[in-house]
Every structure is written in structure tokens, then in C-alpha cells.
Image: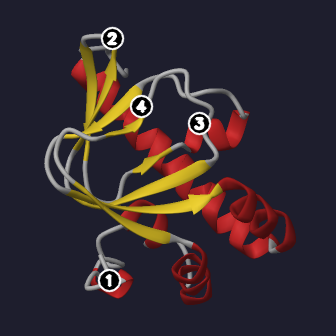
Amino acid sequence: MSSTRFDDYTGKGQFILGALDESDVAWLRLHGKLHELGAGVDLIQKGQELDTFYIIMAGTLVVCHGDKELARLGVGEILGEMSLVDARNAAATVRTLEPSLILSIAQHRLSVQLQDNPGFAARFYRAIAMFLSSRLRTMVIQFGIDEG
């Protein structure tokens, strides 16, 4: 893991990293940790209390509820955003499908930054809103729901 550099992946995290400015990304670099995970690793367990926010830097993960696959997530997508916003336990299990690189940020550190830096908070929450909107649109299309 020591050979993995955050800068090698910052251009890939488009939803979050693409919406933040250079000082925000520098803060994430300082306070986040990169984790290399093999295939088949449960990153999040349904019902788990989450204290971490994640950004997928490389790889593919699957979101499952029981035996049902709900979604596949890739580079630039985020995990733990629901628990960050509503402080509830994980609603689903998230597992790596292939070797993956995940950036983790402790929620308590992120919460302090969001409270202390209104500019960062505005950009960060806008990025989450854009991400959730994109996820919802994908689900609407996937389930054949008429948007009109």
C-alpha cells in the first residue's frame, strides 16, 4: 500500500473530488487513508454502524440486500453518505467484486471540517447531492419508471 499514491487517483473521483477545489482535495489527502482491498471483501455490512465515509478510487463494488444485488459501483462513487447525513446504520452490504482502492475518511474528522469550513461544506454537500441525483436517475431507468 505504501507504493499507492493518492495523487495517482485524484482525477478519477469525479463526483466528490471533481466538485471540490484544490485546498479541499489537499485536506482529503491529509486526513484520508487509501486502502487496497482484494476481491470478495465486505467493506460495509448491512446493519453496521458506520463511522467512515468512502470514495472508490479504483475497482468495482456491489451493493447487496440479502441475496439481491441492488447496484454496482465504480470509480468516483461514494459509500457511507447516507449514514453521514442521517446517522443511521448501513442499509446494505457493500462488497468488492475485484481488487479495489478505497479512500476512507473518518466521519468525525469530516464533520469537524464541514462545520469549520462553510466553503468546503457547500462544495461537499453539492457533490453528494449531484451523486445521489445521478444514482436515483440510474435507478429510475433501471426499473423502467417513467420520468415524464
Question: For residue 38, which numbered disc appears in the image?
Answer: none
Question: What kind of residue is marked 2?
Answer: Gly
Residue depicted at 32% across the width and 85% down the height: 5
Category of crowding for the residue at label 1, using alpha-carbon neighbours closer than 10 angstroms: few (below 14), some (14–19), many (at least 20):
few
Mark 1 vs mark 4, foreground winner is: 1
Q: CA distance from mark 4 to mark 2?
A: 21 Å
Q: CA distance from mark 1 to mark 3?
A: 30 Å
- What colour scheme has been applied to the protein in the rendered image? secondary structure
User: Is 129 above or below relative to 24?
Assistant: above
The residue that label 3 is drawn on is 82
Mark 1 vs mark 2, foreground winner is: 1
Q: Residue furthest front?
A: 2
Label located before the other in sequence (4 or 3): 3
Secondary structure beneath label 4 = helix
Mark 4 vs mark 3, foreground winner is: 3
User: Number of callouts in the render?
Assistant: 4
- Nearer to me, 74 or 32: 32
Q: Residue furthest right?
A: 116
Question: What kind of residue is marked 4?
Answer: Leu
Q: CA distance from mark 1 to mark 2?
A: 35 Å
Question: For residue 66, which numbered disc appears in the image?
Answer: 2
Left or right of 89, for residue 25: left
Category of crowding for the residue at label 3, using alpha-carbon neighbours closer than 10 angstroms: few (below 14), some (14–19), many (at least 20):
some
Secondary structure beneath label 2 = loop
Label located before the other in sequence (3 or 2): 2
Q: Position of residue 44 (x, y in %)?
A: 43, 36
**Pointers 4 and 2 in contact (C-beta within 8 Å):** no
Question: For residue 2, which numbered disc appears in the image?
Answer: 1
